[in-house]
Image (spheres, rainbow, N blue to C red):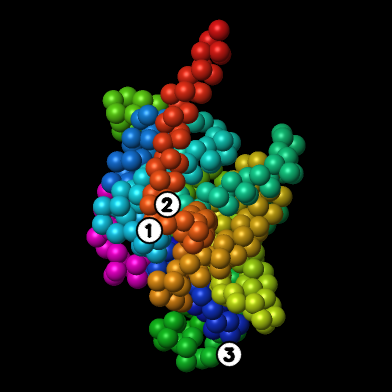
Amino acid sequence: MVQEAIIPFGDLFQIAFGVEGVVPNNEAITSLGLSDFAVQTASIFALGMVCNILLARFSRLKYIFLTGHHALYMSCLIAILMSIAGMSGAQLIITGALLLGLVMAVFPALMQPTIRKVTGDDSLALGHFGSGCYWLSAQIGKLFGRDENTTTTEDIKFPQFLSFLRENTISIAIAMFICYVPVSLIATIQDAAAAAEIFEDQNWFLYSLIMSITFSAGIYIVLAGVRMLINEIVPAFKGISEKLVPNAKPALDCPIVFPFAPNAVLIGFFCSFLGGILGMIVLALMGNAGLAVAIILPGAVLHFFCGATAGVCGNATGGLKGCVVGSFVHGVVATFLAAGLYPVLGQMGFANTTFSDTDFTLVGIIFGNLIKVVNANTLSIIVVVLFLLPVLYNYTIGKKANAKAAD
């Protein structure tokens, strides 16, 4: 329901302001990639989960990545990158699986200190490939600091006559309606025919109202589902933790943090979207100056799910200021990273879309440029070494450190 309401908003935004460019969308680029790399993607996905469990078992990265659709998207990206590097067959699959298993453990580990601040305990981890900018948002929040006197997003007080806005379902619907109405109106004025296709013969005002309520209802369902998931999966996961991977943590999708700061979810979305607009403007100016850059349009799904999570992380470390600034910076950085990945994917003929969430773009940019300077065999060796480093650390330096601490 959330995507059903948020995707048309992005489409209307393009019509309203006459902006043409690339819309980053994980689902779109994955569907294109699967047409050429279905077998490789599926093989990397399956073997990569095994590598994730092995790494959790034999290293200190005790995180089991349980967000299946993101693991699939990353598998597709890795299959594309390994193909560009000149790999095929078993070499592509094994190298790709090791890289997938590594990132499935490293990114949750990167986020765990922040997740402890958000949730108040250490039982859950974040398994979502937007962690690079979530971490950045949390670091930005630390610049403002947070103590018992810090104003957080959840401390926002409404006037008495607006007390009904304390109900998050109502406030989210109203805030989304305020955004939808002007965009729908301008889109209707600019191109009535194109806007009408989105409205599906409904009145633009009524459509905005329905989509705003749909969006709010979707958020309510997500939050209720997350609470139920946490209540069910944590006890069930203890069996895996005790038997297969002692002390392992389940790394779950980004909505797990939404119930801990519902106001930050909405604020983070809006601020990230504004950051995306700024990034788009800067890229357009760079293009007008003669630089070969892709103009990345604000993707509503990206800025809602990832921007909201960045807002929650910024709020956890820096209160309201951390939420606002951290999620805004997320929007800008995510836009530029998506633009940086676009030329890499262009080598395989993918056009008009790219991956959106920042971990996809980081992995794509790093390894997409690395394959320009090393051959396929060297890249395989690099990936194997990176995968083994946490294990070697655990059985050498880590054990020595534990022995000293015991003494």
In the rendered structure, the answer to whether residue 248 lies left or right of residue 136 reads left
Image coordinates for residue 378, horizontal then vertical, percent: 42, 50
Image coordinates for residue 144, horizontal then vertical, percent: 74, 44
Labels 2 & 1 near each other (Cβ < 8 A): yes
Residue found at the far top of this picture: 407
Write the start and end of the magenta stretch as one range. 30-46
Labels 3 & 2 near each other (Cβ < 8 A): no
Q: Residue at x 33, y 35 (%)?
A: 54
Q: Residue at x 40, y 71 (%)?
A: 348
Q: Nearer the viewer, residue 97 or 281?
A: 97
Residue located beneath label 1 in the image: 82
Q: Main secondary structure of the magenta part?
A: helix
Q: Residues within 10 Å of mark 3 (few under 14, many from 20)?
A: few
Badge 3 marks a residue whose secondary structure is helix
Which mark, by number, is residue 351? none
Q: Residue at x 42, y 64 (%)?
A: 26
The reply to whether residue 155 is in sight is no
